[in-house]
């Protein structure tokens, strides 16, 4: 599933430096690298720059500097978007500048909350608690069934996920594209200013192995929130996930973990990103949007 058009993207890493250092220390892949690992295969003729937008020493890009890109891609983050903190507010300001610049945006997790807040929506801590590992039974809405982000994607599927916050107020110009029993807004498309932002609360960029690594790194929080009695109880789950990542045809592990092709098949899992490039980025570049 490749797109041969030469394009230029900026991947915006939403994590502050102290959190990126923790990921390095726990051998968890950085958020921008999760995207780069598959985007370089999907878009072999494209160029990718990185922007660590949470870092206060980074100069905020101008509208003209933003407009050199064909698309902006947002990673997740462990920040809280409704906190009045410079690491957060500068990201919101940047997102608003991208809307003004007319450059298409895509992202996951933090990005869904960013798309909503930057366009005037609202977010909160999810009253049902953390959604982690796998979001089950994500269902495409009626609006989503005709939206180009879901062309070629089944209308119910599972996805990798790890979040505490959620969109609770959809801004003007936004369409909820997918939902599930835990989180009302699992995907959103926001038309605001001069461009659009398509985003998923779940993570198309993760692999089973990388999610297992993240669960291991977050084990203390997951135990403290009552999902397990202690960290030792989590070890079999992480081990099984890693084993299945190495042998995705293992029917016994698939059944035990309730994991199917919507998680394990790259083309299915990454379809939303592919569609964003094909049906928003390229048409915008060609002046068709």
Image (cartoon, grey):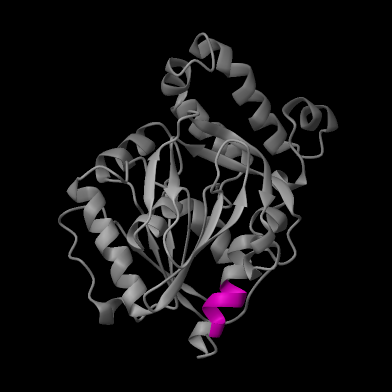
Q: Is residue 97 above or below residue 136?
A: below
148 sits left or right of 101 in the view: right
Residue at 22% x, 75% y is: 62
212 sits left or right of 49 in the view: right
Which of the 4 image quarters holds residue 207? top right
Q: Out of 187 and 243, give the one closest to the viewer.
A: 187
The outermost residue toward the bottom is: 287
Which of the 4 image quarters holds residue 26? top left
Q: Quadrant of the N terminus?
A: bottom right
Q: Position of residue 179 (x, y in %)?
A: 61, 47
Q: Main secondary structure of the magenta part?
A: helix
Q: Position of residue 186 (x, y in %)?
A: 56, 48
Residues rendered magenta in the picture: 277-283
Residue at 58% x, 58% y is: 38
Q: Out of 242 and 274, give the one closest to the viewer.
A: 274
Q: Position of residue 260 (x, y in %)?
A: 77, 41
Residue at 73% x, 59% y is: 153
Does residue 141 belong to the magenta stretch? no
The outermost residue toward the top is: 229
50 sits left or right of 274 in the view: left
Note whether residue 248 is visible.
yes
The outermost residue toward the right is: 251
Q: How many marks?
A: 0
Q: Out of 107 and 215, give the one closest to the viewer.
A: 107
């Amino acid at each position: 599933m490749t797109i041969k058009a030469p394009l230029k993207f900026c991947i915006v890493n939403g994590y502050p430096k102290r959190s990126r250092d923790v990921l390095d220390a726990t051998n968890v892949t950085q958020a921008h690298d999760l995207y780069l690992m598959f985007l370089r295969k999907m878009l072999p003729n494209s160029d990718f720059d990185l922007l660590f937008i949470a870092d206060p020493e980074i100069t905020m890009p101008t509208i003209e500097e933003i407009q050199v890109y064909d698309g902006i891609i947002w990673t997740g983050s462990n920040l809280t978007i409704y906190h009045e903190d410079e690491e957060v507010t500068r990201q919101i300001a940047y997102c608003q500048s991208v809307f003004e610049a007319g450059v298409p945006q895509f992202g996951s997790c933090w990005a869904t909350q960013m798309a909503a807040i930057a366009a005037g929506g609202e977010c909160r801590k999810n009253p049902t608690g953390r959604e982690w590992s796998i979001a089950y039974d994500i269902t495409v809405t009626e609006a989503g069934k005709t939206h180009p982000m879901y062309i070629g994607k089944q209308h119910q599927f599972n996805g990798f996920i790890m979040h505490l916050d959620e969109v609770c107020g959809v801004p003007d110009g936004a369409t909820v594209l997918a939902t599930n029993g835990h989180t009302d807004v699992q995907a959103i498309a926001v038309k605001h200013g001069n461009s659009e932002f398509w985003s998923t609360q779940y993570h198309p960029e993760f692999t089973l192995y990388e999610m297992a690594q993240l669960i291991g790194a977050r084990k203390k929080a997951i135990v403290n929130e009552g999902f397990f009695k202690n960290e030792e109880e989590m070890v079999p789950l992480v081990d099984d996930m890693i084993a299945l990542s190495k042998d995705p045809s293992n029917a016994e592990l698939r059944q035990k973990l309730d994991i199917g092709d919507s998680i394990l098949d790259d083309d299915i899992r990454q379809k939303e990103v592919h569609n964003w490039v094909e049906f928003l980025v390229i048409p915008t570049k060609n002046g068709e949007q």
